[in-house]
Image: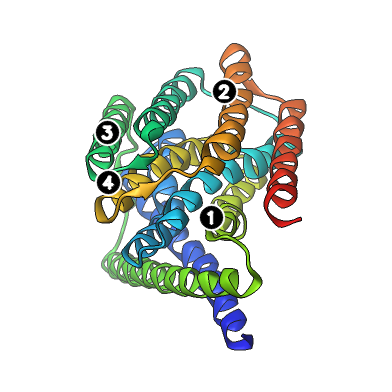
Amino acid sequence: MTVVIILFLIGFLLITKGADIFIECTVQIGKKTGISELILGATIVSFATTLPELTVSVFASIDNHTTMSLGNAVGSIICNTGLILGLVAFISPFKVDKNMFFSKSAILLLSVLGLMILGSNGTITQGDGLLLIVILSFYMYSNIKSVSGKNRVNVSRNLEGDSGNSMKSSKHESFKTCVLFILGLIMMVVGSKLLVDNGVKLASFIGIPQGVISLTVIALGTSLPELVSSLTAIRKKHHGISVGNILGANILNITSVIGISSLINDLPILAQNIRVDFVFMTILLLTLILPTIKSSKIYRLQGLILLITYIIYITTIYFTYLA
């Protein structure tokens, strides 16, 4: 059992460090293309930070741990919104771009509604997964349209005044970024595999249902990239990246993580998911979205309510399934 715990912790470490490397490289690539901060958060950063959830859920589905596939995605949405964005808002309230926030929130609510309707029969099937991927395609299209509608930074400006030596240096930096990009991705994939395999063993040993483990410990572990990137963003006063990252990551958790995982194996919707998880997920999202659309600002009180709701959720999970 000691070996299992060590491998489990190594999985956490690989995911966290790999995501950190991957995000840094992705942001560098994004900046070179001239993508705006808001779109960067909702697209490149959110895609990068959601990869741990995707790899964990896909591996879980391949290994027939299907309750973990769904639980990890839903648990990550709850953690992203309640813990991470709640913490961000509590530390540093901020204004949002109303149009961007509204458009991303609308797609997020559409994704949640789609998940609940498709799962009303107790299962997310391959056909349901394809419909979620259709929503993902629409989301990607809207992002591309948003990017094309923005005034991009002229990439050639970065090359202004470059001499032959600086050009060589630029190529060297680009090569280094690509190598680290791939390394970070590999670390996340390997870490995700270790996390799933040893998470299942730990759950069996302790007697905790896989669904609970995936909704809490593993969901928090795979959400660490979102937490790190969001806290870094507010420290550097890039709040747009932070909120865009969380909204984008939540959309991707439903459309890509659940959608792709269900193409491998049907994902069961448990009574626990309907009675507890979906209810808290909906409360958290509405607490975030409705006041923010009205005021174009996320307040400290709002962040506090999100944090308290997340704590109540974890407490409910504990007393319902573990006490």
Sequence-first tag of 3 and 1: 3
Name the residue carrying label 2: 289
The CA span between labels 4 and 2 is: 38 Å
Q: Which mark is residue 193?
A: none
Looking at the rendered structure, the kind of residue marked 2 is: Ile
On the question of residue 270 being in view, the answer is yes
Q: Residue at x 45, y 68 (%)?
A: 192
Q: Residue at x 58, y 87 (%)?
A: 3
Instruction: Categorize mark 1 by other alpha carbons within 10 Å: few (<14), some (14-19), many (20+).
Output: many
From what the image shows, is residue 215 above or below residue 133? below
Name the residue carrying label 3: 144
Looking at the rendered structure, the kind of residue marked 4 is: Ser
Tag 4, which secondary structure?
helix
Foreground label between 4 and 3: 3
Q: Given contact means CB atoms under 8 Å apart, are the residues at marks 4 and 2 in contact?
A: no
Q: Quadrant of residue 181?
A: bottom left
Instruction: Categorize mark 2 by other alpha carbons within 10 Å: few (<14), some (14-19), many (20+).
Output: some
Name the residue carrying label 1: 211
